[in-house]
């Protein structure tokens, strides 16, 4: 059921089989499977995740390519709750490994917040990442284009940049290297560093050799209308013509709540997993963008399937087998 | 575009980047990604695959739980073709590894068949499996229930068997062991071997200890109406009450066309894969039910994403980088 500050008291004494931190595509897939294995699970969703920013999901089998991320999240949330999962809007502040259980402390409500603690046998870390965007004084100007014609995922949206004039916005020298990948889709690339990068002479030469202009000034404003970019204005007044762009400035990882837990192997900010999305901690699974691998909806959804299935296997194998008692007794009498 | 015997002559001289054998969920996902990477791909679909048998897809994020497999396949096929993939209804008879390319011989048309040969750099094996069903004289009687209340996938549909009287139909002694897993969902299990198994005394004892009756006679008929089972009649007239069932008789693998290719590592009939769904052959990828792992739609879809992405990476890295020539020349003049 949907939990809120009004009814969450009903569940604080529940020992969940699994708590799923993050109600995006991966977390919802995990919850749907867990519920259909008959396991008790709670999704904790902070809201405003990466999937909600997606204006369209082009490459997920079975859904129209103009389906919005928020529509799928809403649909999947209803699916999960219909099958029996609990769902709470809140922010996971802290997770304590108590040995056989986890204690998950959640901040609920922005004002007059409460801090209930839920307990579970397993934890699924599905809290994902958020793409970093260039910081302008007027962030609404960035939001007007980000997720529409100003993309954050080349694999997802490179096709939609085909042979267009494009800006690549990078926050480190390493991130500039995306120019030499995105040029598969278009060679008309202008690199912007928004004043954040000390670009080496070697990189400058490489960009020049490819014919990709580099501008190191700060971005002042994105131009265009109806979410369609027409260009980028820099602080010195330079206008860059561009009908699309790729922001490649890295990601913010929602993984603070895992940092104090022993036994997890990290690769940078990503969790290392093996087998069915299991981390190096027996009772913690990591799915979607938090784990190493491609950040794609289809992969997060499969990860959720795998994590839930392994948790079911573990719990099932640790349970007493259900016998058909009437027949067992009958046999005992006959014997 | 959709190919048929009428227009396939247009494509026999095409060197595809990838040919996808099998147009189920995994193959369609691969094709959608390949097309959106701007790669030329051809899906070859024999029809009547496992997904088309699915009467509902309960656990795929974003789609209603009563969505039919055939609806998703049709939708995904249109998606893939709209993005630029070619799609041909036909049966892959033979694949020859020519070193840098594959020659894929296809039987097109049931009557007056033609046998065109298509060529590609990469091959994605997505031809899957088909669940074996008990063979009755009247197969329509089996089809009336299989995929509805007589399930073939416990992970997919165990939930829908919850605490119901169920038959487990097994074709080997090993397959009878599913009783001790499906009992997570219901303990009211009757095991039927349809005359196919020499059941050991040890197994008989184990079933008796759990209270699960065992019938070794042949099945005569499934009873019920509107795809809802009410029971199973055996050849000696015994009636087993059951409102649901699980057929666990193994699968037929559509992998004959791969058997002559050197360098593939097999695990039984499954292909061993690593990384992004790559087999032990550099240019062959295996996705979905053909590869080792869980046979789930979500996983096949993710596999397709991975295979297509790795193929794109390989092809991109082997290609000349696209330069913004106007700027490169301009620079040369300035110098």
Image (cartoon, coloured by chain):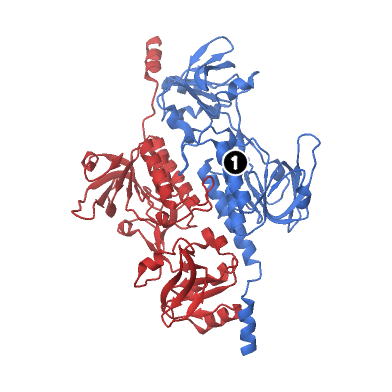
Chain colours: A blue, B red
Quadrant housing the C terminus of chain A: bottom right
In the foreground, B136 or B82: B136
Label 1 crowd (10 A; few <14 / some 14-19 / many >=20): some
Across and down, in percent, residue A150 comes to 52, 25
Vertical position of residue B277 compared to residue A132: above or below: below
**Residue A193 image-quadrant placement:** top right
Residue drawn 56% across the image and 83% down it? B205
- Relative image position of residue B285 (x, y in whole percent): 40, 50
* Residue A143 screen position, x and y as percent: 59, 25
Q: Nearer the viewer, residue A39 or B261?
A: A39
What residue do we see at 35% from left, 36% from top?
B84
User: Residue A180's x, y, as percent?
Assistant: 45, 29
Q: Nearer the viewer, residue A262 or B133?
A: B133
In the rendered image, the vertical position of residue A44 relative to residue B144, given as above or below: above
SS category of the residue bearing label 1? helix
User: Label 1 belongs to which residue?
Assistant: A74
């Amino acid at each position: 059921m949907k939990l809120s500050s009004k009814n969450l008291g009903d569940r604080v004494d529940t020992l969940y089989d699994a708590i799923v931190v993050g109600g995006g595509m991966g977390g919802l897939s995990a919850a749907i499977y867990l519920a259909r294995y008959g396991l008790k699970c709670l999704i904790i969703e902070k809201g405003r995740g990466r999937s909600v920013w997606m204006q369209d999901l082009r490459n997920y089998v079975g859904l129209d390519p103009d389906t919005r991320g928020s529509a799928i999240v809403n649909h999947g949330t209803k699916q999960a709750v219909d099958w029996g999962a609990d769902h709470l809007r809140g922010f996971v502040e802290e997770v304590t490994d108590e040995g056989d259980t986890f204690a998950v402390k959640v901040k609920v409500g922005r004002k007059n917040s409460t801090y209930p603690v839920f307990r579970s046998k397993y934890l699924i870390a599905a809290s994902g990442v958020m793409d970093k965007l260039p910081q302008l004084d007027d962030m609404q100007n960035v939001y007007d284009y980000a997720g529409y014609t100003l993309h954050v995922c080349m694999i997802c949206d490179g096709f939609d940049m085909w042979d267009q004039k494009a800006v690549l916005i990078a926050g480190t020298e390493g991130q500039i290297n995306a120019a030499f990948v995105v040029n598969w889709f278009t060679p008309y690339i202008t690199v912007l560093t928004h004043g954040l990068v000390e670009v080496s002479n070697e990189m400058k030469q490489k960009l020049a050799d490819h014919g990709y202009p580099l501008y190191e000034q700060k971005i002042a404003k994105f131009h265009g209308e109806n979410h369609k970019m027409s260009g980028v204005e820099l602080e010195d007044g330079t206008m860059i013509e561009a009908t699309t762009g790729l922001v490649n400035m890295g990601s913010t990882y929602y993984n603070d709540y895992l940092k104090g837990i022993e036994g997890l192997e990290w690769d940078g900010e990503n969790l290392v997993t093996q087998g069915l999305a299991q981390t190096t901690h027996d009772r913690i699974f990591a799915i979607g963008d938090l784990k190493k691998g491609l950040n794609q909806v289809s992969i997060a959804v499969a990860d959720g399937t795998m994590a839930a299935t392994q948790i079911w296997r573990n719990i099932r194998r640790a349970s007493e087998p259900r016998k058909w008692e009437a027949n067992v007794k009958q046999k005992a009498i006959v014997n």
